[in-house]
Image (cartoon, rainbow, N blue to C red):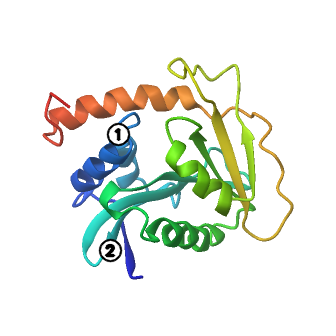
Amino acid sequence: MNLTYEKISKENISLAARIQYEIFPNSSAYTKYLKEINSKDKLPVDFLVYSNNTAMGVIGLYQYEKDENIWLSYFGILKKYRNKGYGKQMFYDMIDIAKKFDKKYLRLYTYEIWNSVAQGFYKKHMQMEEYYKNEKDDQFDINEGKPKIFSYSLHGDQIKPWNNKYIGLNLDDEDHYKSVELMIKDGILKEDN
């Protein structure tokens, strides 16, 4: 399987934002991508994923704090490319990239209901799962299901549970609305989306 990863840049940000929004309509990453393309930091890093020169997904890595964790970001594939082995390849390619950052654990958060299709994949390929609840995180629009943290040991260390440390889910909600407005303003989305 021949996948290529193109770092999100000024040249491809519109395409990346459209694909990311189609995959995650409740969590637009456009403002995140805009901040990151001008950053000199090694993390976060986000990629537009291609199969045979066709853009078919997005994926990235980031950190909350400078600690032993690296997080998987917006790991998604357009519907017509799913169930073909691309997700597994992307996941293990990101593990190889994550190891270069000298972190102990790869983690991701997801939602039990909103990301229900991906739950089986995460249970199969990640090594630990735990529910997440932190009173500082205003999870105002989660009426059913719960957020989860999945973890993977990058170097064989025993995984330390996340134990509900704050991760800032409420910030994602704020960024989503700003991103959608900006995507409309920049002509990436039409107002009826």
- Residue under label 1: 31
Can you tell which mark lies on residue 144? none
Q: Nearer the viewer, residue 52 or 64?
A: 52
Q: Is residue 152 above or below residue 88?
A: above
Query: Which comes sooner in the sequence, label 2 or label 1?
Result: 1
Q: Residues within 10 Å of mark 1 (few under 14, many from 20)?
A: some
* Mark 1 secondary-structure assignment: helix
| Quarter of the figure with the C terminus | top left
Q: Which residue is mark 2?
A: 51
Give the residue at the far right of this rendering: 158
Residue 105, quarter of picture: bottom right
Drawn side of residue 104 relative to residue 62, left or right: right
Q: Residue at x 75, y 33 (%)?
A: 164
Please give left or right for residue 45 compared with residue 12 in the image: right
User: Would you say 87 lies left or right of 13 here?
Assistant: right
Q: Position of residue 176 (x, y in %)?
A: 38, 31
Please provide percent x and percent y for residue 110.
Answer: 57, 42
Q: Nearer the viewer, residue 70 or 19?
A: 19
Between 26 and 96, the one nearer to me in the picture = 26
